[in-house]
Amino acid sequence: MNNLHIQVIHGPNLNLLGSREPTHYGVQTLADINEELVVLGDKLGVRITSFQSNHEGELVEKIQHAEADGIIINPAAYTHTSIAIRDALLAIKLPFIEVHLSNVHRREEFRHKSMLVDVATGVIAGFGTQSYALALRGLHHHLTSKK
């Protein structure tokens, strides 16, 4: 039985996973990642729903209307620019984990700044698609250890 619900939100260009810069992002597709999260969620007793958009406003709307116990978000390029996504996450007061497939701190300087890092429950980066699984395990632990 899945008592918890975690909303997974994927930002711009993540729909291109599998073909986009495989040296940074690997060869798994977004569908592969989402499927693995559902399987892991079932093992942990967590219902997983996923959403991807290339549009900042759609991501903000999804966050504002999240009916979940927590969020895993890979804001992608919006990590470095979106005060709107930050404000939406602060407004809903749900714990969230910021996720990145690549180690953003080993990349271009502009990727080193996150608009979310200081308000996130946790941040996981650099483990490829396993970053999502680690985030799910971490958020699950955070949510269940509080009860």
Image (cartoon, grey):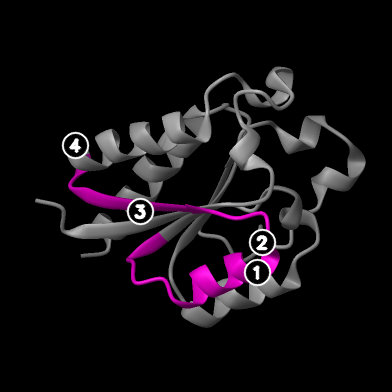
Q: Which residue is mark 4?
A: 43
Q: Is residue 55 magenta?
A: yes
**SS label for mark 2:** loop
Nearer the N terminus, badge 1 or badge 4?
Answer: 4
Q: Which residue is mark 1?
A: 85
Compute the Cα span from label 3 to label 2.
21 Å
Residue at image position (57%, 26%) is: 128
Question: Mark 1 is on which residue type?
Answer: Ile
Nearer the N terminus, badge 4 or badge 3?
Answer: 4
Does 89 sit above or below residue 33? below
Compute the Cα span from label 1 to label 4.
30 Å
Q: Which residue is mark 3?
A: 49
Nearer the N terminus, badge 2 or badge 1?
Answer: 1
Q: Quadrant of residue 53?
A: bottom right
Q: Name the residue at the right extreme.
A: 109
Question: Mark 4 is on which residue type?
Answer: Lys
For disc 3, the neighbor class at 10 Å (few under 14, some 14 to 19, many from 20) is: some
Compute the Cα span from label 4 to label 2.
29 Å
Q: Which residues are magenta?
A: 44-70
Question: Mark 3 is on which residue type?
Answer: Thr
Compute the Cα span from label 4 to label 3.
15 Å
Mark 4 vs mark 2: in front: 4
